[in-house]
Amino acid sequence: MEGLFAVGSNGSGQLGIGHLEDVSVPKQVEFDSAANTPTPEDPVCKVAAGGNHTILLTTSGRVYWSGDVKSGSGGHLTPAMTPESTEFRQVVLVDHAQTQPRVTHIACMWACSIFVTAEQDHDNQKVYVFGEGLDVPAPLVDFPPSGTKITDVDASFRHAVFVLSNGEAYGYGTGTKGQLGPMGAMSKAITSVPRKIEGVSFEVRRAVCSQFSTCFISDAGDGRVLVLGADKWGLVTAAPIAVPDWKAIAASWGNFYILKYGGDIVAWGRNDHGQMPPSDHPNITDIAAGSEHCLALTTEGEVLAWGWGEHGNCGPSIDGPAGDVSGRSSILASLSHLPATSRFTLIGAGCATSWINIATDGIFI
């Protein structure tokens, strides 16, 4: 059976674990009904988290929501969510009389959610946004541009970036620090319509968003890197020129992390809470970054965490009253403590939240 487990900040029910208390030991999330629960044939494949809400995406394109209903969910959950709800419920993007579109990509800003839908794979895409005053999921008009497909989307505090099949990147939201490139004559440097990000000299494969900066990277094998936006903590000036053998890329509010195929991590940025990876970390196969912490999956079958873990998102073993895990890593989960047929299929991280999906063949967990 598939099992999604969560730890961390839960004051708005964003962990979906049946109550409003923070937890530091992984607890399995709950869904409002058996009919709306992901299955082994349709498991959770992506977690996106805002300030106080979380959305989950399954392989078939279903989306679930838990947490602060003021972040735009309104009545678009099945069934309608009340302020006391503490489990995941399915998101309704269109009227009940219509067929729900298949969601292919999700992302969250602080109080806003973004859904990319498609009829088949990446055909006839639409982008829905709600939150920040939008109670009804509203499709963005004339986006993506004709002849292109959205291949990736990422978001942070107040901005989001879409990567298109032609290698261009489009920005959405706030660009006051230059994180969306030059904004021209726009008085507030805020755009509610995605606009092309200028100043990137290569075809973009992935883009990830810190709080006030954006990191772009080209195809593996080339791996050119560019950071636009605020240079606090050296996010711009300390960026590598290229990481050709990159496998994955992630961003916290003040850090960028690039995982290499050899299992090493290239990281730069903030380290006041231990956000930089420990120098003696084992071989890493996957990474996920939250607001001020990072998760890593190892070849030995462990999920590690480091950084700021005051809310339990780095596990119970923290350093002092600040809640840091600094210069070392904490083990959130280990296959050595699970049945022999178990495997980790997903790690995710949000605003002081951490997520692990476990699959175990043949038995319930």
Image (cartoon, grey):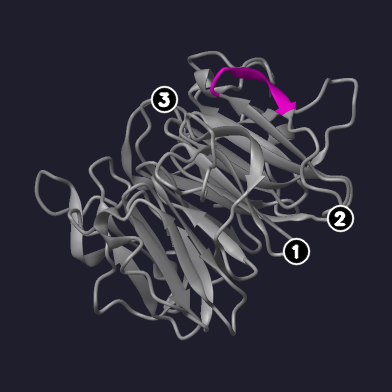
The residue closer to the viewer here, 40 or 45, is 45
Label 1: few (<14), some (14–19) or many (≥20) C-alpha neighbours in 10 Å: some
SS for tag 1? loop
Q: Which residues are magenta?
A: 132-138
Q: Nearer the viewer, residue 108 or 199?
A: 199
Residue at image mark 3: 12
Return the mark for residue 147: 2
Residue type marked 1: Asn
Residue 142: percent from left, percent from top: 81, 38
Query: In the image, is 234 to the left or to the right of 172?
Result: left
Assess whether residue 135 is covered by the magenta stretch.
Answer: yes
**Picture coordinates of residue 44 (x, y %)?**
64, 50
Q: Report the Cα–Cα distance between label 1 and label 3.
A: 39 Å
Q: Which mark is residue 199?
A: none
What type is the residue that disc 2 sits on? Gly
> Which residue, given by chain and number where applicable, does mark 1 sit on?
166
Of callouts 3 and 2, the N-terminal one: 3
**Residue shown at 40%/66% (left/top)?**
257
- Residue 278 sits above or below residue 198 on the image: below
What secondary structure characterizes most of the magenta part?
strand
Q: Dividing the picture into quarters, in which one does residue 271 lie?
A: bottom left
For this orientation, the residue located farthest to the left is 320
As drawn, is 201 to the left or to the right of 226? Answer: right
Front residue of 38/204: it is: 204
Name above or below for residue 202 compared with residue 101: below
> Are the residues tagged 1 and 2 within 8 Å (C-beta)?
yes
In front: mark 3 or mark 2?
A: 2
Looking at the image, which is closer to me, 257 or 281?
Answer: 257
Amino acid type of the residue tagged 3 in the rendering: Ser
Q: What whole-number distance in Å separates the C-alpha atoms at marks 1 and 2?
A: 9 Å
Between marks 1 and 3 in the image, the one whose residue lies nearer the viewer: 1
Q: Secondary structure at mark 2?
A: loop
